[in-house]
Structures are given as structure tokens and as C-alpha cells.
Amino acid sequence: PNRVRLVETFLRGFPKQDFLAKLKKETPKWMDNQINSDLKDLDKITPLAIDATFDKIFKTVPEQKKSFIRYRVIDNKVYRYFSKDVEITKREPSFEKALKTLTKLTKLPNIDFIYSDMDGTPEEYTPKGFYITNEKEMQAPIFTRATIQNSPYVVLIPDYYSVSTKWEEDCQKILNQMKENPWEKKAALAFWRGGSHDKGYDIKSYKKRPRVVLAFLSKKYPQLIEAGINKTEYMQFLDVLEKDNVIKPFATVEDHLKYKFLPVLDGYMCTYPGYQWRLLSNSVCFKQKSNEVQWFYSALKPYEHYIPVANDMSDLVEKINWAKKEDQKCEKIAKNATDFILNNLMLEDVYLYLYKAIDSYSSHLKIDKNSLLKDTKSDPRWVCVQQRRKANKILLKMKNEN
């Protein structure tokens, strides 16, 4: 039987009826457009193409191979491939739990695919085209939670936080707290807290990085901006940043709700879940222009759902001054953003998107179920993870044999 322990899924507290109702309705146009765009360059993907793509990743970025996982769903059961040269672990990614959650909600197609557990695929640090094969017919896409815009052969899916019931719980908390922080009570300041996480910089260039720039702008324009870097474990240049007096105390989500203007800045990759809850907050997001995107970004429009700011923060002060003068417009932008989350990014919507991405991907696959099942059963490296206790016994045996 296809039994899954509740703890191995996100079913506890899951809005099942809302999800099933949305599954029967017409899919929001932005979802279809994004998924179709991600799959547009792909025709018939064969298991051999998936093999070739997987091998290319392992050869090009061997240091990252543990971040790429191959999954199959056959007869609504989830299988995972455990490569010989990758450490066998019992860790279960959120995505794996999300897959199993879907199998308990609806019937998934029989599929074979590659999932990336990196912050994004590709990233600034990875070699260009590290997953792209020499022959197009031997190319398979990568399922990823973020990417650099216009990167080929990637299928965007919801991130690990958005597929968890923690997102649903946090949404309810924010909605309750918003009642105590209506627009007219919020301070007309740009408020931001975050780590110093940013793309490659050194002691000579750190002051040019957007997060540090924002913290320095706060010192220069305290009447407009209240921003600072949080002290985190293993952070770069802590002593230097402390001397610069840009380290500020940690702030909760509730603290952010007291301010009208909330900057959204990338870190090593897109900020998630930071963007989602800020959009929900009934404050205005000042979104840094960036070529890093997630699955829902294409649905958002500047000055309708957020206010765009230059990547280097050079026009932030100008945009804040504009926002202070255009209070009614900003209140409307904040409401539009909140409504977008409530109608498009609640947990049932997140799972609708994930299901649609998987289902659409399956239509591009050229696989035979019986052959897929035979191959899976004949290779001991394919382990059914539908029941983790049973799977972990098999994994322990494999580990001991290695």
C-alpha cells in the first residue's frame, strides 16, 4: 500500500479542499505562461537525455553533485537515485516531502527528472552552462527554485519554504498582526534588516555591495531609512562592519510591519521567503532590480505590486521621497501586493503551481512506464522513498556495503 507517515509530508494543517477546488478551476494565466516559457525549448525528453544531463553536471561541477538529485514518480510513488560517489544521507529535502504531499492529494504522472537543491540554478559562482549537453536532443531541464533570467533548460518551482506549512502558518500570523498595523499607523520610513550575504566581494569592494550600501544610506538619511546588517555566524568582515557602525539588532517580521517601505534585496540569490512575506505585509516593497528570478516574479508589475529601485541603490532615496509624496498611490500598491499573495501564493496555490509544472513537464517526456519501472527495479541505486522508515533501512545497508 502507498502509505506515508504524516510527518513525511506537509499534510498536517494543509488546506486540502482549497487545493482540490483550485485544481478543478482554470489555472491562473501567469502560471501557465511561466511554465510554458520554461518548457518552450524542450521537445521529447528521453531517459537517455536525463542520464546525459545528470552526467554532465557530475563531471563539470563535482563539488556540487550532492546538490542535484534525480527523482522518479511511478504509480504515484516517489523514487530517488543515490549515486555511488555521493554520500548516502537520510536527510529528506523539503521538496521530497512536497512531492509525497502531492501524491496523497492527487495522482501524479509517471516522470523522471533532475532536481537542484542549490539556492538557484545556475548561480553566479557556477561555470556557465555547466548542465548543458553538447547535443540538444540529449538535454533535460533542471527543476530549480530560482535562476538567472533567461537561463535555458530550467523549470522554476516553489522554494523549500513556500511548500512547507510554515509558510501557511506565517501568513496567518502576518494577517493577524496587520490588523494592528494599518497603513495610516505605519511609519513612513524604509526599514530593512538582513545578513551581509552577497555575491563575491572583498575588503576593497564591500562598501559597493547593495546591502552594505543600504546600511550606509541609513546613516546618511536617518529620517528616510532605518537599515542595518544583522550579526550572523561566519559573516565576512564583522570587525570592519562593526567599526563602520552598520551592525543593527535583529528585527522580527512583526517589527517590519510597522513601516510603510520595505526594501527587498538579493543575497547569494533571490531573497526567499523575504520577498513573499513582504508582499503580503500591506507595506510597499522597494524591489531591487535584478536578473535573479523565482517562479512568481513574472506575475508582478512595477508600480502595481512594488516600486523598482536600482540594483546599486543609487535611486533609493529619490524613490522614498517620491513615495512619501504619493501616499495614496503607495497604499494602493501595498494592497495590490497583499491581494496578489492572498489570491496566488497561499499554500494551495503553491501546490497548484508545483503540480502544474510537473504535469506540463510530463507532456514533454518520451518514456514508457513499464520500461521505466523495470529500469528502476533493476538498479539498486533507485530507492523508493515513499515510506522513509523502510527506505532508511535500505540506505543504511547501502552505506555499510560502501
Image (spheres, rainbow, N blue to C red):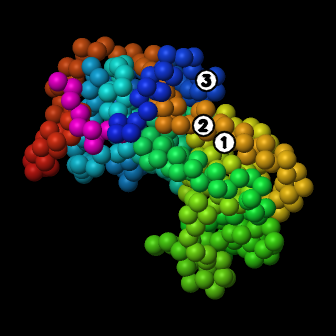
User: Can residue 193 be seen in the rendering of this structure?
Assistant: yes
Q: Is residue 318 visible?
A: no
Name the residue rendered at 83%, 63% in the picture: 317
Q: Is residue 150 above or below residue 251?
A: above
Q: Is residue 39 left or right of residue 50?
A: right
Amino acid marked by disc 1: Thr
User: Does residue 191 belong to the magenta stretch?
Assistant: no
**Relative to 41, does residue 4 appear above or below in the rendering?**
below
In the picture, which quadrant includes the N terminus? top left
Circles 2 and 3, Cβ within 8 Å, touching? The answer is no
Residues in magenta? 1-10
Labels 1 and 2 touching (C-beta < 8 A)? yes
- Read off the residue under disc 1: 338
| Circle number at residue 28 | 3
Marks 1 and 3: CB-CB under 8 Å? no
Q: Position of residue 252 (x, y in %)?
A: 56, 63
Instruction: Please tell me whether the stretch drawn in magenta is mainly helix, strand or loop.
Output: loop
- Label 2 to label 3, Cα distance in Å? 13 Å
Mark 2 belongs to which amino acid? Leu
Residue 289 coordinates in the image, percent (x, y)? 72, 50
Residue placed furthest toward the right: 325
